[in-house]
Amino acid sequence: MRNENEFGNHPHRDEGVEKETTSRREFLAKAGLMAGGVGLLSLTYGLTWAVEPQNCAFPRSSTAPVSFQPDRNLAVRTRKSASTLTATEVQRLKAAYTALRRLSSTRPNDSRGWLRQANAHCWYCGGGLNGRAGEEIHGGWWFLPWHRCYLYFHERILGNLIGDPTLTLPYWDWDRAAGRTIPAAYTNPNTAANPLFDANRGRTPTATLPTSIVGSQVMAQVLAAPTSPLFMGSDASSPNSQGGRLENGPHGAVHIWTGTSFQSPQQGQDMGILSTAAQDPVFFAHHANIDRLWDVWLQSSNTHQNPTDSAWLTHRWTFYDERGRRTSISVADVVDAENSLRYRYDDVAPKAMAMDEREAESRVTLGPNAITKTIPVPDELHAKIMKGKAADEPAREYVLHIEDVHFPQHRSAIVHVFGNLPRDEKTAALSSDRYLGYFAIVPRTTKDTNRKAMHRHIVLQVSERIRDLLKASKELSVTLAPVTAEGKPSPSKMAIGKLYLAED
Ligand code: C2O
């Protein structure tokens, strides 16, 4: 397997760089300059409409990348919750994003600029509208380390642009009751005068994330994922690779919620579509929380371990560092973030969170597009379930696999999953012991053209209660209820490739 993946793991290795500079046009469109007569907007941000990039490739470069070296002289910096930033820290962050956006307009081919960085994310998650893309880093075990690298370089670039190497990205702690709105710095003011603002959000500053997607119950389920494949995704080189609970759950749902308003289907962008998500500065606060939850998961049990496979540890990507140097960095370089990347989080203690009443009551309406399918439990598996585990055996996990989930027109949805619901139920409680969890599908693009079908493979653990029910029957009926980010039945029809039960 090739390890250098900036332009690779892709049949057309040399297609990762631009044939000509097309990004200037995209930048101008994004900045609103192509609408004629609105040139005065050039120094404001976000008074724009969504422009999905045509081409996400990196600028051409002939220099070989340097290898990442940890800077041990750099003092360890602490990433704080966005809700605890001081006024000075908010000002500093805004100054840095102002400089980042300015770099994008003054030097559009500088890989450190705002749009160039956003397009690097696009490149690694399906590519631009021209269909050209790099290695897919979503839907498997590259997800956490790739985004860790990406945030690290983003943070160092921001610090460098304002000459302050102590700058850190804040995290959006939507997993706590106090963090359920978009963090205030990003919405105050909620206009283009704020460099942290993004016009392509589907939410007002006071809108709150539903507990059904980020509440304590959901978070407890996510953080209880017992193995690294279930938590952070499995070997991405396998054709059957699956995304982890963190990625397919709250990660995706917060993207969809932030970017999308189902009243207006055009508003999938920016956060609601992977190819534009990183154009919204709140992307980085969202992902800082994902990155922090990786630490929380590791802290919360000594059986929670990162993969030890060398295929994972030696895998490399190329980024641009704060000085604009192409830099090759491996997964092994970033697993110990404090030591090598010189940052830590102010709080990674796993917390027992109390479920609030509202949350205990939340129910989903199954709606006309819900699907119930009955699947057989294979004999061998059934025998194991019947037998239970001997005292000296490790616990077995049984997992429901859901493969190739599709929605038309690249619409997103959040899908709640139940096992063996009583027949003819119209609603189901998320606190019920028949609830297996949910997954969220973040589309790559708004258009259905020029793309390979998106392969998404979801796994959810089978609860103890369902395991007990399976003792009496050799069938599992699985109900999938797609909802919008607001929790209403989704208007989009969903198709499922394959459903089966297996041992983890
Ligand atoms: Cu790379 Cu949150 O997506």
Image: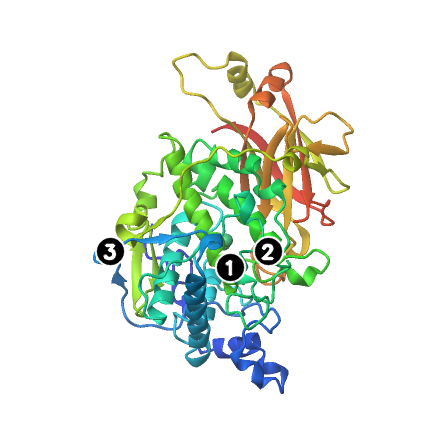
Question: For the residue marked with disc 3, what is the amino acid?
Answer: Pro
- Tell me the distance, in whole angstroms, between the alpha carbons under discs 3 and 2: 34 Å
Mark 3, other Cα within 10 Å: few <14 / some 14–19 / many ≥20 = some
Q: Label 2 near label 3: C-beta < 8 Å?
A: no
Quickly name the residue at label 3: 70
Please tell me whether residue 68 is drawn above or below residue 395 in the rendered image. Answer: below
Q: What secondary structure is marked by label 2? A: helix
Question: For the residue marked with disc 2, what is the amino acid?
Answer: Thr
Q: Indicate the position of residue 98 as horizontal and vertical percent values.
A: 45, 72
Please tell me whether residue 136 is drawn above or below residue 395 in the rendered image. Answer: below
Residue lying furthest front in this view? Answer: 87
Quickly name the residue at label 2: 258
Quickly name the residue at label 1: 282
Q: Nearer the viewer, mark 3 or mark 1?
A: 1
Question: For the residue marked with disc 1, what is the amino acid?
Answer: Val
Left or right relative to 476: residue 136 = left
- Tell me the distance, in whole angstroms, between the alpha carbons under discs 2 and 1: 9 Å
Q: Indicate the position of residue 307 as horizontal and vertical percent values.
A: 35, 38
> Which badge, 3 or 2, comes first in the chain's sequence?
3
Q: What secondary structure is marked by label 1? A: helix
Q: Label 1 near label 2: C-beta < 8 Å?
A: yes
Residue lying furthest bottom in this view? Answer: 37
Identify which residue, 423 or 177, lies in the foreground. 177
Q: Indicate the position of residue 469 as horizontal and vertical percent values.
A: 62, 18
Please tell me whether residue 207 is drawn above or below residue 416 in the rendered image. Answer: below
